[in-house]
Image (cartoon, rainbow, N blue to C red):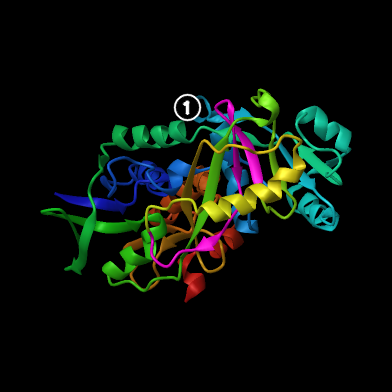
Amino acid sequence: MIFEFVIIGGGIAGTSAGARLSHLGSVLLLESEPALAYHASGRSAALFEAQYGAPATVALNAASKDYHMTANGGVLRPRGLMMLAGPGEEDTLERDIAAMALDPIPVEEALVHIPALNPEHIRAAAYHADAWDLDTDLLIGNFVKEMRANGGQVRTGAAVTAIHRDAGLWHVTTGAETITARQLVNAAGAWVDEVATLAGVQPLGHRPLRRSMARMPAPGGHDPATWPMIIGAGETWYAKPDAGKWIVSPADEDPVDTPHDAWADDMVLAEGIARYQPFVTEEVTRVETSWAGLRTFSPDRTLVLGRDPGTPDFIWCSGQGGYGFQTAPAASQLLADLVAGRPPEIASEIVAALSPERFG
């Protein structure tokens, strides 16, 4: 069988691309791990915040909101977002307020949202309600259902070991099998440049950066279910309710030389928790578990969507960074529009900002 599309990568990039492309032809999605969303997609903080990211990312966020709210019953639940400044961080918070369209609030009001905050340390606060928890499992599941409803196939435990192009077709080897496709979609997350090299396509210079998380009891024994996510000014740390617990991240972006199954560095976590600690009254005495994921960015930290200019049947769906889930509906729709030759709904300047051609 010759597939129209073989997609390499089973995270949010690959599953959303598979759903959209399944309307254009036969799809086979290959994931090297035993389950989908095993790496970065399975370790996301899972917040939808429309103002978060570079301008092209914000445009994709805005175009994705309605899908997140309504498609298949929606995947969003109210959360809210609050940013806090400690001593000397007031100017940084002012820039964050302008960038993310937040409303300044008195410190006393911040304590109403989260009674465990330390008013003696906090110098300024800002808040808005327009941020939502995003059900990542449900969103991926919805995309996979759509793909399969159109005849698309998913294979896990299918590591790609070789790729070559012959007579206008791609030949992708996984295990003892070689699969043939007319078009190859590179949605391999931290491994996208390695896949490109394997396929004989010029890599774009993506950089995997480690992001760590620690789960701990909620401060002071509170129930944090209704608390907003909180972020330190300049995104030097963040914290969020998680299934009755509390997760704290140092917001690290440590480069890794080689893509791998990432793990948290104890010292990085300790430094991040130390930055967070003065903002709450309860001392952190116990971390229950920790993990890390690789957030992969293109050289300009903006997604890459579209056909490779030198090899047009090689399609990039990469550089999601920390924005993969919130941009997925619009990013995957744009990818399908470009592949099908349809006029995209996204503005032309945004399409250009996302195109692989910008690196030529």
Give coordinates of residue 280: x percent, y percent.
Answer: 75, 38
Question: Does residue 184 belong to the magenta stretch?
Answer: no
Q: Is residue 203 above or below residue 9?
A: below
The residue pinned by badge 1 equals: 72
The reply, left or right, for residue 11 in relation to residue 232 is: left
Comparing 330 with 24, the one in front is 330
Which residue range is magenta in the image? 238-259
102 relative position to 196: left or right: right
Q: Is residue 347 above or below residue 130?
A: below
Residue 352 is drawn in which quadrant?
bottom right
Residue 25 at x, y percent in the picture: 28, 46
Q: Is residue 289 above or below residue 311?
A: above
Query: From this viewpoint, which residue is outermost toward the bottom?
Result: 360
Query: Relative to the observer, which residue lies in front, 164 or 20?
Result: 164
Question: Which residue is located at x 27 percent, y 68 percent?
Answer: 198
Residue 49 seen in render: no
Is 265 rendered above or below residue 312? above
Q: Type of residue at label 1? A: Asn
Residue drawn at x 68%, y 31% is: 219
Tell whether 302 sits left or right of 12. Answer: right
Residue drawn at the location 58% of the way across and 25% of the way down: 244
Local packing at callout 1 (Cα closer than 10 Å; few below 14, some 14-19, many 20+) is few
Residue 333 located left or right of residue 32 = right
